[in-house]
Amino acid sequence: MANGTVIWIINHYAGSRVHGMEYRHYYLAQHFMRMGLRPVILCASFHHLLTKLPEDGHARVDGVPYVWIKTRRYERNDARRALNMVDFSARLLFAGLGQLPKPDVVIASSPHPFVAFNGHRIARKYDAKFIFEVRDLWPLTLLEVGGYSPRHPFIRAMAWAERLGYERCDHTVSLSGGTKDYMVGHGLDESKFVHIPNGMDPQTTAEHVEALPDEHRRVIGDLREQGKLIVLYSGSHGVVNALGSVLDAAELLREEPAVHFLLVGQGPEKESLQRRAQKAGLPNVSFLPPVGRSQMPALTQSADLGYVGLQKRDLFKYGVSPNKLYEYMAAGLPILFAIEMDRDEVAETRCGFSTPAEDAPALAAVLRQVVATPRERLREMGERGRRYLQDTHTYETLARQYASLF
């Protein structure tokens, strides 16, 4: 790694502190700059995770250069979203990037593997190192969650792009340590596998802290006055997030006055979940809109526990690296972990409670246990999680791991 190394980070879904999720490459880029490197983020002008759309095609966000590739909009997880993926990859082929400094390293980050083609092409053009970063195993995700046939042309195209990334990269960076065998089975040289998970950036986060919106302050204040144990879920309300099991647990805990579920975020399943909760007359569930990145510390610090869950699927046995887990840890929250995978960081670090995925009775039983647990013990759990995060998952540490590949 040389001082001044130029790094192009291609991430369809890249966000920023200003524009909303997701934040991985925003934080990595901040630390790359502090190390004397020169990152540039190339991302889509529209995707469902953005809370604020970019106004121009080029800008600097907290010093990091961003280039937004114009892409078509979509509202649902349907064919329009697939077209948005293809749109990004196709337009990136012809984007005028000549004004950017020539890259020494190209990081092409999924979720969809079409970006591997762009990363390989750009790296070859500029004789740069090519790093293929895999955040989600696509097309496996669509095969298991979406029910697509492996013979579907779109799936076949994804599988071709995935194998291209594995075979032509200098390194494949996986956010989960359990994916190596899968990747090797799909064309990756085992020696090229690197595990660099998600994390948190306490320093940058602390520099940009804002108060919660009035609606959130009012709802949380009312719950506090009532002495509720606030169980927070903050993130996407999608099918894979299995929030239906949370509502099932709320039904089972209807007569447990201490527990209240607070679901904060947006997503394709939110309206359906709200209708279901309203129809069931659940008094122990509240829904709130998403908050900005700078408001997240105020949100997590207002809760008593943080919930992380996913559907019970073979896909997740390879592991996941959910941002919300580390956001909860940063706030010192004990974790309710309902994901079935090979490695359970919550159990390993003793920073919370683990339950089977999509098992509402087990979740309800654990929460009855939590209610009976002394608050001092809960604080000790949260503190163990915070120390674990600071020792292993800060973006300063992760950026140095990344830079060792350059």
Image (spheres, rainbow, N blue to C red):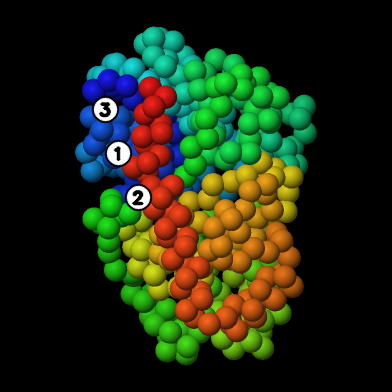
Which residue does the image show at 70% across and 59% down from the upper left?
357
The answer to which of 261 and 400 lies nearer the viewer is 400
Q: Is residue 256 left or right of residue 126?
A: right
Q: CA distance from mark 3 to mark 1?
A: 10 Å
Asked if marks 3 and 1 touch (Cβ < 8 Å), the reply is no
Asked if marks 1 and 2 touch (Cβ < 8 Å), the reply is yes
Mark 3, residue position: 38
- The answer to whether one can see residue 196 in this image is yes
Secondary structure of the residue carrying tag 1 is helix
- Residue 140 rendering spot, x and y as whole percentages: 69, 36
Q: CA distance from mark 3 to mark 2?
A: 19 Å
Q: Quadrant of residue 107?
A: top left
The answer to which of 65 and 340 lies nearer the viewer is 340
- The answer to whether one can see residue 154 in this image is no
Q: Earlier in the sequence, mark 3 or mark 2?
A: 3
Mark 1, residue position: 31
Secondary structure of the residue carrying tag 2 is loop
Q: Earlier in the sequence, mark 1 or mark 2?
A: 1
Q: Quadrant of the N terminus?
A: top left
Looking at the picture, which amino acid does disc 3 mark? Arg
Q: Earlier in the sequence, mark 3 or mark 1?
A: 1
Looking at the picture, which amino acid does disc 2 mark? Asp
Q: Is residue 174 left or right of residue 318?
A: left
Q: Mark 1, residues whose alpha carbon is within 10 Å: few (<14), some, or many (≥20)?
A: many
Mark 2, residue position: 201
Secondary structure of the residue carrying tag 3 is strand
Looking at the picture, which amino acid does disc 1 mark? His
Which residue does the image show at 39% across and 9% down from the upper left?
127
Front tag of 3 and 2: 2
